Amino acid sequence: MRKILRQGDVVLVPRASLPEGVEAVGDELAVRGEGEHTHRLPALVYRLRGDAEDSDEQSGQRERVFVVVPDALALMTHEEHPPLAVPRGVYEVRQARRYLPPSTQGRARAWGD
Amino acid sequence: MIKMGTVYVYHRALPEGATPNGEWDFRIPTPVEGWYIFVFEGGRSKRVPWHSPRSSGEWRWAGNINHNYSPHRWRVEAGICPICAHVIEADAYKTYTKAYNRDDIIYTRLCDKCRNNQHLADFPDVRRPLPRLVKSALRYVEFSDTDFTESYKLRELLSTREALAAMRRACIASYDFLQHVSECEHAELIEVNEKAKLALLAIQCDTCRRRRYFFDTDYTIKRLPCALEHQIQAHPGEKIKILAGEDDGQLFVHRVHPRNSSILSAIAWMYQLTKAQAAQLLPSPPRRFRKRKKHPRGVRRVAHPAFRQRVRGIPTHPARRR
């Protein structure tokens, strides 16, 4: 069983397969993290747009991102983190979110926002 | 790699909309639902010794100290109120610790004022006024630039007598420790994270590697047993930083939803995972912290030889086994 992988505020959750209805986005995952740098992973990137009803009530996330690592091993790189070896497979990309009290925004935001 | 010898001091957030250069308007709603917490190198929160403060309004000891803390003990003669950053005098502790004939036990709790005001009952959404001492400290600390990320500026900041004095009065940080950091060439201020509206001083000192520190009223640096690492809770709305044994030794838990007060649930919320998945991101606690299986009746797991012979008929003496 593949483990959840994490590099900084980006988490890769292993999935058995891609869900239906995804659309290809590109061949490199680039997620901007908390700092100025970007997490990069050479992999096929897919996006799944959800309805507003499907969105997470806290994060307001309406879009899910999946990556497919075709090679045996791919390296996720970031300037501030050591490289992360990602084995072949399908992963869902999750990014850390932070809580904003209702008095401010009332919703959680990802760091890249 | 697990970083050692790191102390994180969290102090009051910058008021929302305030500019660091000028006078701060404290009437502006501030994200003050956070607490003053001291976070040390952390691990799991499974063995948090204190009850949740939200239910009782104060930190309370969770059980028998002898059971919970037999291998690791530490000492402090006073605590720091997590709300108003006042020093709590040691009297309250002394009575307790003497009763157990253990003068080397600490635990933190709120000061009387905060406890009586039931600040925590309103937690986390109530906007408490900034404590006076913290206000004065913040006024003394003149941030010359909005860019806090450059450590030399912080070093400058911390080396100013006014800032140190103010911080000392506000009990935000230890004078000696800051002095030590400002003088020690190995010390390095790792990070000040402004984005979360919490000024974070992450201090790592190579000379103090493999030590953990705690501030007490004497403003001395005390070694802190690693047991406390495993008792840190992620407080709602607060940002903590756990040093765990994963990729780069750092695992941030940013401001988390108030419901998620434990580290595990905080991480699960933050990454939108289940708790089981979040547990994969945390390292296993050291062996000495793992729960030991006990027999339900408290008997030894291996029967005494005499018992074996009497009940099972197994001769105790090797010569008789033949």
Image: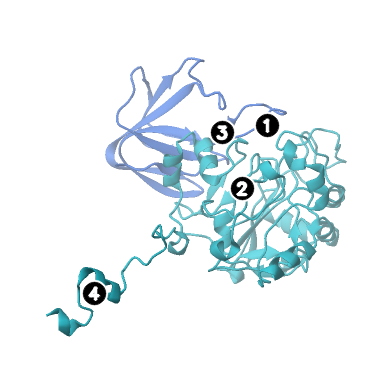
How far is mark 1 from mark 4, CA to CA?
67 Å
Mark 1 chain: A
- Labels 4 and 2 positioned on one and the same chain: yes
Q: Quadrant of residue A72?
A: top left
Q: Is residue B308 visible?
A: yes
Mark 4 chain: B
Colour displayed for chain B in the image of the structure: cyan
Q: Is residue B184 visible?
A: no
Label 4: which secondary element: helix
Frontmost of labels 3 and 4 is 4
Q: Amino acid at mark 4?
A: Gln
Residue at image mark 1: A101
- Residue B300: image x %, image y %? 37, 67
How far is mark 1 from mark 3, CA to CA?
18 Å
How far is mark 4 from mark 2, CA to CA?
56 Å
How far is mark 3 from mark 4, CA to CA?
69 Å
Is residue B48 placed above or below A45 in the rendered structure?
A: below
Q: Is residue B317 left or right of residue B284?
A: left
Q: Amino acid at mark 3?
A: Gly
Mark 2 chain: B
Residue at the limit of the structure toward the front, as seen here: B310
Colour displayed for chain A in the image of the structure: blue
Residue at image mark 3: A112
- Residue B232: image x %, image y %? 59, 53
Q: Amino acid at mark 2?
A: Ile
Q: Is residue B53 left or right of residue B287?
A: right
**Residues at discs 1 and 4 in contact (Cβ within 8 Å):** no
Find residue B309 and name its label.
4
Q: Residues within 10 Å of mark 1 (few under 14, many from 20)?
A: many
Q: Residue at x 46, y 44 (%)?
A: A7
**Residues at discs 1 and 2 in contact (Cβ within 8 Å):** no
Q: Earlier in the sequence, mark 4 or mark 2?
A: 2
